Amino acid sequence: MSFLSADSDLTRESYYAATVARTQGFPALSGSLETDVAIVGGGLAGLSAAIELADRGHRVALLEARELAWGASGRNGGQAIAGLACDQTVIEDQLGLEASRAVWAMTLEALDLIHERCRRFAIDCDWRAGYLNLAVNARKARELHDSHVLMRERYGHETTWIEPAELPRWIASPRFHSGTHDARSGHLHPLKYSLGLARAAAGLGVQLFEHSPVTAITPGATVRLATAQGEVRARHVLLAGNVYLQGLAPQLERRIMPVGTYIVTSAPLDPALAASLVPTQSAVCDTNFVLDYFRPTPDHRMLYGGRVSYSTATPANLKASMQRRMAATFPQLKDTPVEHAWGGFVDISMNRAPDFGRLPVDGAPQGASNIYYLQGFSGHGLALTGLAGKLVAEAIDGDAGRFDTFARLRHRPFPGGPLLRTPALVVGMAWYRLRDML
């Protein structure tokens, strides 16, 4: 069984799918089509790029192998957080402080872009402001405080430091030591947001095709994309399928790893109990390398994510094991049943920095390829995907400065080759889990 088929087994019980109806479907591609830009992948990155390109007057066709927002875009933890999955020092070390500050500013722009699109396209996605980043022990608290100070002094980003004595006012859990609160970040219903973007793209004239997996790419001044029943010819192509490209670009797949992550929602709670667990109703994440993340929902549930699989195998007894994780954080919920359990794969890069660029094409000068790609969001892409789509549109429109800032980041392939890289990652992650416990 491939990880793609394993992933499909995890979509059935999503809380998101149970709380929003797909009222708009799109046909499969049939026949031949010519366009300015073709996009492979109908998630947040692809839809965002489609909107930005249509705004700039380009003809756009988007090809999605399943349904729009079928992957991580429609089933993630719903946390829209400033910054990247990696520490900002990773960007500093590679690009220098000035460029790193520009990257940080773009991650804040990504949050603003969510609000801008919700206003413009009347997308109701249950936005709630606030994000708690919490340390589970004193050692991790010192690391978090150092980061809090660095981000304030070097990047001008203000968060509230929460001392141990103050923490009970922010979260009703014995598990955490101290933390920070970021009022600018927050959380939303990702499937509502993604489907809202799809409606917006269609309204702008983007041609959207579902159930149209791309089977081959033929590079050239005009790129040809083949599907089972048709083809698209385009002057520019964006690969926005992340871990779901399924062999279309092997040189990219070596630089990301599909990592399974799993989420549950509790049964509806008494409203007073639900309000007491996280009084600010913020999204919450711990600072462990192998982390837990959770948030309250508008209908008084606890949405709790955490357990990961680096082997692509779905954990056994998922509901029961995730309920135990939730109860370990909130003993108040030890007898609360889980009603929804689901998961999926995110695209992790080696350094957890995003991997944007152009696909090398034989005969094309360095940086002159007309095939762009966006990947490596590393579980931190709900906001950043929107910005990434905007950067690609800018580059295709002739201003590649901001896109190329990200493209300058260096990425290494995962060690071990096709057969051994997953076992190697499993061993490496076991070491990180042990380190999280110290």
Image: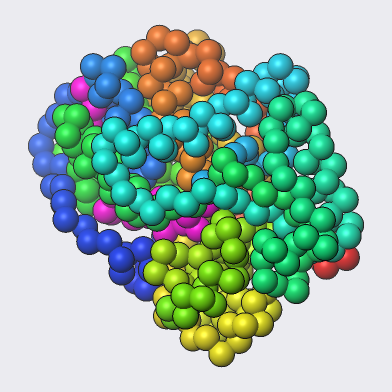
Against 86, residue 266 (above or below) is: below
Against 89, residue 188 (above or below) is: below
Tell me the residue at 22%/48% (across/down): 210
In the picture as drawn, the residue positioned furthest to the left comes out as 31
Residue 40 visible in the snapshot: no
Against 376, residue 395 (above or below) is: above
The way the protein has been coloured in the rendering is rainbow
In the image, taking residue 292 as reference, residue 168 lies left or right, namely right
Tell me the quarter of the picture where residue 32 sits: top left
Q: Position of residue 301 (x, y in %)?
A: 46, 72
Tell me the residue at 22%/51% (across/down): 211
Tell me the quarter of the picture where residue 221 sits: top left
**Span of residues in magenta:** 59-79
Q: Position of residue 386 (x, y in %)?
A: 43, 35
In the image, taking residue 52 as reference, residue 406 lies left or right, namely right
Q: 223 or 157, which is in the foreground?
A: 157
Q: Position of residue 410 (x, y in %)?
A: 67, 28
Q: Position of residue 46 (x, y in %)?
A: 36, 37
Residue 121 visible in the snapshot: yes
Tell me the residue at 67%/61% (across/down): 170
